[in-house]
Image (tube, coloured by chain):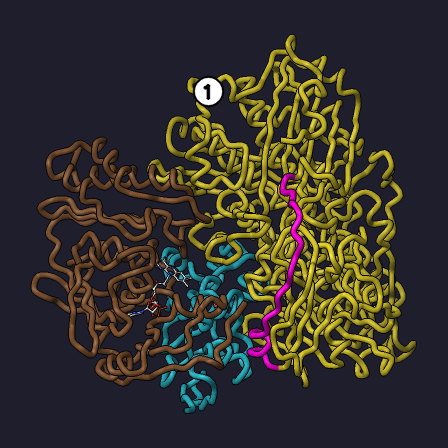
Chain colours: A yellow, B brown, C cyan
Amino acid sequence: MRAVGRNVLRKDGVSKVTGAARYIDDLTFPNLLYGRTIRSTIPAGEIAGVHLNFDTAGFTIVDYRDIAGRNIVALIEDDQPCLAEREIRHVAEPILLLAHADRERLLAADVQIDYRASTPNYDPAASAITFKTITIDKGDLDRGFAAADRIVEGEYRVGHQEQLYIEPNGVIAVPGPDGPGGDEGGIVIYGSMQCPYYVHRAITVLLDLPDDHVRIIQTETGGGFGGKEEYPSMIAGHAALLARKARRPVKIIYDRVEDMLATTKRHPGIIRHRTGVTRDGRLTAMEIDVLLDGGAYATLSAVVLSRGVIHASGPYRCDHIRVRGRATMTNTPPNGAFRGFGAPQTQFATEVHMDRIADALGLDPVRVRDINALRPGDTTATGQRLGRDCSARQVLREAVARTDFTRRRKALAGSNRGIGLSLFFHGSGFTGGGEVKLASKAALALTERGARILVASTEIGQGTRTMHAQIVADTLGVPYDCIDVNAADTGEVPNSGPTVASRTCMIVGRILQRCAEDMRARLGAMTPRQYLRAHGPLVVTKEYEKPSDITWDDSSYRGDAYGSYGWACDVVEVEVDRDTWQATPVAFTTVHEIGKAIHPMLAKGQIEGGSAQGIGYALIEEVVMRDGRMANGQLTNYTIPTTLDTPAIEVVMLENPYKHGPFGAKGVGEMPIDGPAPAVINALRHAGFDLREIPATPEKIMRARSASPEQRRPSAERESLRSSARSGSELGVGPQRAK
Amino acid sequence: MRGSISNRRLFEPRSLRDALRMLRDEGPLVPMAGCTDLYVSLNFGTLKDTRFLNLWRLDALRKIETRGAGVSIGALATHTNIMRSALVGKRLPMLAAACREIGGVQIQNRGTLGGNVANASPAGDTLPVLAAADAVVVLASAGGIRRVPFTAFYTGYRRSVMRPDELIVAFDIPAVHGRQWFRKVGTRAAQAISKVVMAACDDDRPRIAVGSVGPTVVRLPRTEAALASGASIADARRTLVDEITPIDDLRSTAEYRRRVAANLLARCLTEFGMS
Amino acid sequence: MPITLTINGTRTRITAHPMTRLLDVLREDCGLTGTKEGCGEGECGACTVLLDGVPVNSCLVPLAQADGTHVATIEGLRGRHPLQRAFVEHGGAQCGICTPGMIMAAVALGRKPSMDAMRVGLAGNLCRCTGYWAIYRSIRSAAGASKR
Ligand SMILES: Cc1cc2nc3c(=O)[nH]c(=O)nc-3n(C[C@H](O)[C@H](O)[C@H](O)COP(=O)(O)OP(=O)(O)OC[C@H]3O[C@@H](n4cnc5c(N)ncnc54)[C@H](O)[C@@H]3O)c2cc1C
Ligand code: FES
Ligand code: FES
């Protein structure tokens, strides 16, 4: 029986429900030491002195001078030190590392750091350091605005969001001689992570070791959502430094507070739109300005910004678009990867803005979207011509029909309930030339009963092992149960690139499929066993091959930004309590077109889970930053949705295959989180509360402008008739101004 | 960061008398009930005390029983015990309602009424109920028993009249004859800390208490007096706003708390049939 | 003074500081690492075990208060509980870190919990992966299975 398209049992299911699955904190080693990180308590300044106010006997103590290689967390820019030397750029910046065999003594150790404080900057618009700027230009903006009957402007704000995987970050570093490199001092690192090869590179640079002296092994990982994309390189570096110095295994597990205070979050952003529209609702010009708060170091800000700006004009056709994006530095802990990667921020703005355009024109929000939704043959902001796998209108129409949106909207008018929708898309795989640069590899080893998958893609809950095994099983023509999946261990698997960007199925899955095709051809009529007897071991390794019809020019930001896009539409009904302004999502429907659901249940799990996270982002998840420090870094004060906060989620999956995806599959991991926030805000607007910012806490809803036309204050809306419209730069909506 | 425990000492009394004697002779000791507050601070590393008294075995303090027309609830009764008690359900449904909204089941199964009160957070959910119901806190020490009206129990933010050698042993709650009302407004739908929490009853005259709007839970004597002398809901709202002193904090704003407290009052009074 | 408790049916003597968290006793002294720590503040429920049959957060229970009790952990279900199979079949476990605590809390819901009972009874168990509905479907299906 074929495996693809069926809900086969997930590979890691049994171990997870029995408690047998081993997460990093479940492992121990002989002679283990526990590690602890001493961090800065100020947001900006210099270290003036370090005092160890404890008996240091039995302690291993590491600072930047113990670093043999380069003191950086190697990623894109090399700006972030693994341990601060002098300069402090944010609260919770690591300065000193301690290890001890006795946790109680470790906890009791008192370290005092003296500082020379300087003035921090928390305003991304006022920052002196810009990590990245990107401009996307399509057509001629002036012409577009000239063709407009009206211009609608708006400014939208999104806050930080914490990934809040339930398993905090943790690693164990085990130094040689048992490890690679033997007595020469190689190191093995076990940990909770998404990208073993990111960690591998960071450690070789930090410790100045050859590649084969460093081995990274992913342990069962209790959620990532992007939060274990780049950060594990940091904590692994710390454990490795301690372990090398102590010549003993060192375990560092963050507690929840440390994890919240020190690790990356979703970038906050300010997004401005200035849009030209005709009376009948056609978009003639879109001018969009995106500002992301990168935090103290560059980490992945450049690529987050890239995905953000490419998605900023939404799934809409428009001939004249300019998107300008900037990510700047502030004195807060670095922001980084989080499911969606810039797209939730920018599409929030687009989708709330679309409703305001509809309002301004007195048109139905569905109609405005339907007129403008991208169709096959249309081009995106980067000039990518969409193929038949573009489904923007299908998902919109399906969602509207399913929810009886238009009638429902009329029926609810004037009540304390509102209904809103959002139409969105999400590119699968790395942006632009990313996949070519990565040149990912995957391999398949023939086994007696089938094959063993060798990829560095990690299972973090989304079902990597299962979905890959399904693709291989059907391509090879063997039962699903005959496919094994190797641990993501850099000592055994090739570099398949990071487990991010909705690429694990579409990109890595496709490479695996090619391995399986090749293996099947070699097997011919033989069974695996017969082949092994006759020819000995067989390992097929393949590298990413760019489909010839994909082109991208990074210097002009033009071309096929992604191989393919998923398309989706969310509809949410929200009830606002008249006494407390608490908004409760009471019904949620989402229609997702994902190419092909390799495992419908896993795909649905991604959509439900991502939608729930999106609802949290929309309503209750608020990082309160005070003096550069997350002031609510406990689960009791940073609230994520519980059972009672999560409405029933109706999931509809449509399939419109992508020709280069395995069995037609596109990505599904990230897209679900792009849509809920704008849908919720649009529903609130329908219920009478005009918000431009998330999270829409009751406090903000209470203070929101009334969205009903008769109460609307003139200053609240900055629409102007075409005759009085000025160009973007005159209005100052181009480059961001300081407040 | 987690606090260490090797330097801490736990006393294990076998009876209430034992416990009170230990408090007198070995004190100061920090009483440990369900530990749903204490162990959070221990795990956060903010608990500095080193000597503790384990109350958990003192089953005598778990009783929920009739006391005249009212109820007496032992300090160690858990939120689960209380919400499941038929007696409480009948005589003091607003307390059952409060306990039902505390934490999740795991917290309800361990957290106690005595702990909620002794912890003295202004956001404690059972506190407005006890205040509105004119409960009496029964305090015991080796020297004897002291009965303190709940409304006189707190003296300031996280401060009360309870002495270090005393334990809360029970709450005596006189009969409430009129309707009862409870509403919690938390940071999310479940497992939430209150931003505003209100309890009220309309015996011969309305009695109203609010939490999270000042350093301690408060009764609203002026609002109550106004209502007793026939004030309108609109007037009562205004009086309430003058009577509470909410602040901006991590979880909410003073303005929100003020406006929501006024709205809850109006909602409650409307449900009580006033206008 | 050693403390005696029954863990998954086996009487066990523990020699540890009486204020040690039950969670640490299970994970470190008994090697039962199926019970997880997600927060140490009673919020996430990943450390949920049954203490004399009722769910508690083992990160908030001092060993001294578990003296003489029966503790049931995920390992005690021995892979044979209908809920365990159902969580695999219906997508109730994604990353799996919340799963042991979630299943123990679900065990305490009894045979055929209503939708309300599930939503209220699991409100103290956070799951960041599933959005909860696959968990309800798993529990529902286990209820159906155990009826047969
Ligand atoms: C996840 C979570 C959710 C929560 N949700 C809520 C909520 O929704 N609403 C709410 O109000 N609270 C909530 N709490 C707080 C807590 O659960 C309650 O305050 C609970 O009632 C405390 O009782 P306890 O027995 O656990 O107290 P403990 O932690 O044992 O003790 C708390 C304090 O009271 C003292 N004490 C305890 N008993 C006595 C006594 N008999 N005499 C004298 N002093 C005593 C202790 O010394 C200590 O200072 C929550 C806690 C957690 C961890
Ligand atoms: S670890 Fe115990 S509740 Fe989170
Ligand atoms: S399955 Fe990952 S937290 Fe629940």
Residue C135's spot in the image, x, y percent? 49, 60
Q: Secondary structure at mark 1?
A: loop
Determine the image quadrant of residue A469.
bottom right
Chain holding disc 1: A
A115 inside magenta stretch: yes
Q: Which residue is mark 1?
A: A712
Residue at 38% across / 33% down in the picture?
Answer: A416
Determine the image quadrant of residue A732.
top right
Residue at 70% across / 44% down in the picture?
Answer: A329
Q: Is residue A575 left or right of residue A89?
A: left
In this view, which residue lies farthest toward the right?
A535
Residue at 61% across / 27% down in the picture?
Answer: A369
Range of residues picked out in magenta: A102-123
Residue at 60% across / 29% down in the picture?
Answer: A155
Q: Nearer the viewer, residue A644 or A78?
A: A78
Q: Is residue A209 left or right of residue B262?
A: right
Determine the image quadrant of residue A206.
bottom right
B206 inside magenta stretch: no
- Would residue C83 be seen by someone viewing this image from the given angle? no
Is residue A37 depicted above or below A666 in this figure?
Answer: below
Q: Nearer the viewer, residue B22 or B106?
A: B22
Is residue A618 depicted above or below B43 in this figure?
Answer: above
- Would residue A159 be seen by someone viewing this image from the given angle? yes
Residue type at mark 1 is Arg
Residue A239's spot in the image, x, y percent? 71, 71
Q: Is residue C69 left or right of residue A724?
A: left
Looking at the rendered image, the quarter that the C terminus of chain A falls into is top right
Residue A511's spot in the image, x, y percent? 82, 57
